[in-house]
Amino acid sequence: MGRAPCCDKANVKRGPWSPEEDAKLKSYIEEHGTGGNWIALPHKIGLKRCGKSCRLRWLNYLRPNIKHGSFSEEEDHIICTLYLSIGSRWSIIAAQLPGRTDNDIKNYWNTRLKKKLLGKQRKDQQSSKKGGQVKQEMKREVFEDLKAPSLCMSMNLYQSYWPSEFPLFLTNPDQLHQDQLHVKNHVPNFNQYPFDTTSNQAEMFNQNCEKPISTSAYHPQMANTHYYPNGDGVNLFQEFNNYPYEINELDYNATQLDQFDGLVGGLDNLINGSNCTSSSAESTPSWGDSLVCAPPQMGYEDCRRELLQSCHREQQPNRFQ
DNA sequence: AACTGGGCCAACCGCCAAAGG
DNA sequence: CCCTTTGGCGGTTGGCCCAGT
């Protein structure tokens, strides 16, 4: 037996909201609040709507300070940057854009921004030369393009989540348990930090490194993000250093769009990125080709060294210096 | 004028985790 | 500890609008 529906679907109105319904809901919430129970709310005010529908209507349309209308270039940058960093975590992205709802951002991304971004990449690709050297050039260009100001914003976001006293480099797995205890014991509101060591990325990391990484800490709200507690973290800067290679190879093509969506895979790219090649013999892949990644060659120490070198190589914000 | 296809977006669906009994 | 209810989220859908034919 499946779970009971949240409301009696035969007796609730569906579809677009009327101005009268909007007015009822808005005035009630403004006066009384939601009362902590969305399911009961429509009955209180005589609306034949599902509580979930009321909640959605309020959050996405009626609540104060909602921004409607076109997105600015700055907002575009933030969305692109965060999407590449954390994927389709629309609520988190929305939290960085005051007045925008997750639904708005999701719609905007799916209908316009994705095409806009991929269109840009396509243009870049067409105007570029061939050869592996060119890939690096393209990678650098996109990286530079994203770096300012959007990447700085990402770093700010990242830093806002992460306690400054803890380094973001990989730590020796042998010490992880102690590190975790240390972090948990000393960081106020530890559970609010966005990391997830039970994600696929963590599993992949474990497979690709010689020693397993502890997966005890978990924050459900941030599942599948690329942050790890106790120092086994991957900074956004590092991830960007690995993404643009694939970004430049995207085009208007359903398969490629899917691949683009898969770009947020993170750690596998972190470890395998430099080993990825096109399946075709030419150095410039075409759209029939699949990307083939060589088996991971790096062990734990290699991973760590690579991260440390990369972090020091790049001009990173103060906390990494 | 009628039809059609695509873009856009509000709303719905279903899943998951937290909360509470 | 289990079960139910609720909130929250991301994915998907359906319908409106408009440009093109």
Image: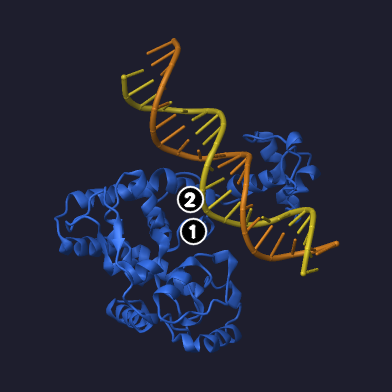
Chain colours: A blue, B orange, C yellow
Give me the residue at 48% from left, 88% from top.
Answer: A174
Give a yes or no on whether discs 1 and 2 share a subunit: yes
Task: Judge whether residue A100 can be spotted in this image.
Answer: no
Side of B10 where A53 appears, left or right: right
- Marked residue chain, label 2: A
**Mark 1 residue crowding within 10 angstroms, few (<14) / some (14–19) / many (20+):** many
Residue A163 placement (x, y as % from top left):
50, 80
Residue A179 placement (x, y as % from top left):
52, 87
Label 1, on which residue? A93
Give me the residue at 73% from left, 38% from top.
Answer: A9
Q: Quadrant of the C terminus of chain A?
A: bottom left
Give me the residue at 71% from left, 49% from top.
Answer: A29
- Marked residue chain, label 1: A
Tell me the amino acid under the disc marked 1: Ile
Out of A57 and A259, give the one closest to the viewer: A259
Numbered tag placed on residue A6 in the rendering: none
Side of A290 where A29 appears, left or right: right
Q: Earlier in the sequence, mark 1 or mark 2?
A: 1
Q: Quadrant of residue A201?
A: bottom left
Q: Is residue A153 above or below residue A307?
A: above
Report if the CB atoms under discs 1 and 2 are less than 8 Å apart. yes
**Mark 2 residue crowding within 10 angstroms, few (<14) / some (14–19) / many (20+):** many
Q: Quadrant of residue B17?
A: bottom right
Tell me the amino acid under the disc marked 2: Ile
Side of A117 where C8 appears, left or right: right
Out of A25 and A165, give the one closest to the viewer: A165
Numbered tag placed on residue A105 in the rendering: 2
Residue C16 placement (x, y as % from top left):
53, 28
